Amino acid sequence: MTDSPTAPSGAAKPVPPGLVEAFRAYERALMDDDLEALDRLFAPGPTTLRGDAAGLLVGHDAISAFRGRRGGAPRRRIVQTHVQTIDDDHALVVAVTELERGGRGQQTQLWARLADGWQVTAAHVAAPAPALDTRVWRVVGDPLVHGSGSGPLAGESVAVKDLYAVAGHRTGAGNPAWLDAAPTARDHADAVARLLAAGADVRGIARTDELAWSLAGTNAHTGAPPNPRAPYRVPGGSTSGSASAVSLGHATIGLGTDTGGSIRVPAAYQGLFGIRTTTGAVPVDGLFPLAPSYDAVGWLTRSVELLVAVGDVLLPPATGGSSGGSSGGFSGGFSAGFSAGDVVVVPGLVDLASPEVAAAVRAVVPAGAGEEHWPMADLPGWLDAFRTVQAWEAWQSHGAWLEGRLHVLGPDVRARFEHARTVTDGQVSAARAVVAEARAAVRSLVGARVLLLPSASSVAPLLGEDMEPVRAATMQLTCLAALAGLPAVSVPTTTAPGAGGLPVGACLVAAPGRDRDLLRLADELVGSPQSRN
């Protein structure tokens, strides 16, 4: 650090007494990761600010919690420091930093002399961006694979979840050991090939949670991709990298999968549009499996128009009598596939979400929608059966490779596979009987209507929070479409401003094969005044 922070040339006001010492104490505490000292040097109260490329933290408590989770700041030294004195008790300090790993950054701090001495009331930190954000991408190009150059998706770019085969590359499935042993793909997965043929480029291969078995997006090996719509919160998994790439603007289409919510949850957490297709509607050739009975192709976009356009490429022709195009909001006309009276809300399902999420979903219920009270007593048993079959199939898919290698997995995913190896044939047989009953019941309840429910039970949890309670609550909602093999489209909305204005997903679920109708209904929902963010 420079010995003497200086006022800008020609400034009339000198550096206030004690400020330099406080600034130096802050730098020492930062490099020592002295959390107690850092807390003392940041002003108390709810208005203290700290921002960086990831987002803005508001309030001393939020800043303190962030520091406690991050594990220390990057090593650096101060190469320039300038002070702009405002008055005897306030000053702006701007410092140029040189990172030990290379590159220069900058920090700007507003200091105030308060009862406990000089303290930071607002700070902004800028650091050099990495050439490749390895939290988001495993492999990336400009593009990685060129599309056909013409077609309905010409000019679009795809972030491919690291479960799909991309010719000339290995499939890593979110785990370094799996990647090391994986062969190089000779051909593209079916979905990848069709997107390329439609004109889209593959921007790169995006990160996923290990072996696709998570809803958090916090890979133990590569870290959590950022969530720009909800900074310092989880991105949602397991289509985490593809979702973040789309949310960040690195790609326009995020190709992923949804077994138990892995499209719908990141869509909800990051304010994206997302679809889980009818199970089996889009071929899974060249796709790494988790639980084949439930695995479904899906994708995420920032606009509903592009969500629909991708559906026109990947989905089979509609089997019903739907017609194309949108015609205004819910209060107006609908595509021939659905009418306002076809939408049904089940309060018992909506109330499984947190109050702020439930309120956000109710705010986009269309005029004319029905309300029904479905039997809820069987839902916990359905979820247990879903999880039992999922675990058994996951072990059948990968147990032979994992036997003797469970140590290569992160703690959460390892625990799931350790349980999966104990599931007996008798247990899965009993669970399959419950799943069959659940599938018939859900399909009968949905019928020819559209079920509207939350895509996830909460807003995105903060990084470092215990995800298991959130995961269990969310899967009570997401398992319904998975159990019955139904299409589900997540439409973004937000909580009320007083609840933080955080992203939320409203999920539309319909009968098998009604994917295109749901996409057009989502298009109309976006036109509804209630849904505009």
Image: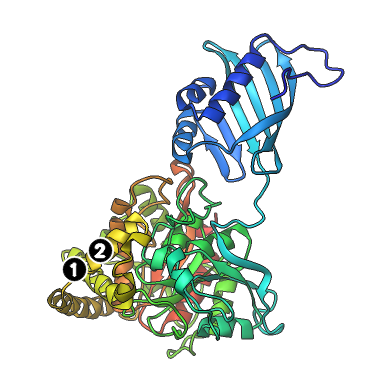
Q: Are marks 2 and 1 in contact (CB under 8 Å)?
A: yes
Marks 2/1: CA–CA distance: 7 Å
Residue 55 x, y percent position in the rendering = 57, 43
Question: Could you tell me the amino acid type at mark 2?
Answer: Glu
Q: Tag 2's secondary structure?
A: helix
Q: Residue furthest front?
A: 404
Label 1 neighbour load within 10 Å: few <14, some 14-19, many 20+: few
Residue located 39% across and 57% down the image: 362
- Please tell me which residue lies in front, 323 or 134: 134
- Please tell me which residue lies in front, 247 or 417: 417
Label 2 neighbour load within 10 Å: few <14, some 14-19, many 20+: some
Residue located 77% across and 11% down the image: 14
Callout count:
2
Residue 431 x, y percent position in the rendering = 17, 75
For residue 381, what is the image quadrant?
bottom left
- Relative to 76, is 191 on the left or the right? left
The quadrant of the rendering that contains the N terminus is top right
Residue 395 higher or lower than 497, as above or below: below
Residue 305 visible to an observer of this rendering: no
Residue 201 visible to an observer of this rendering: yes
The quadrant of the rendering that contains the C terminus is bottom right
Q: Tag 1's secondary structure?
A: loop
Question: Could you tell me the amino acid type at mark 1?
Answer: Thr
Residue located 49% across and 45% down the image: 232
Residue 15 higher or lower than 393, as above or below: above
Where does label 2 land, which residue?
Answer: 418
- Relative to 50, is 178 on the left or the right? left
Where does label 1 land, which residue?
Answer: 422
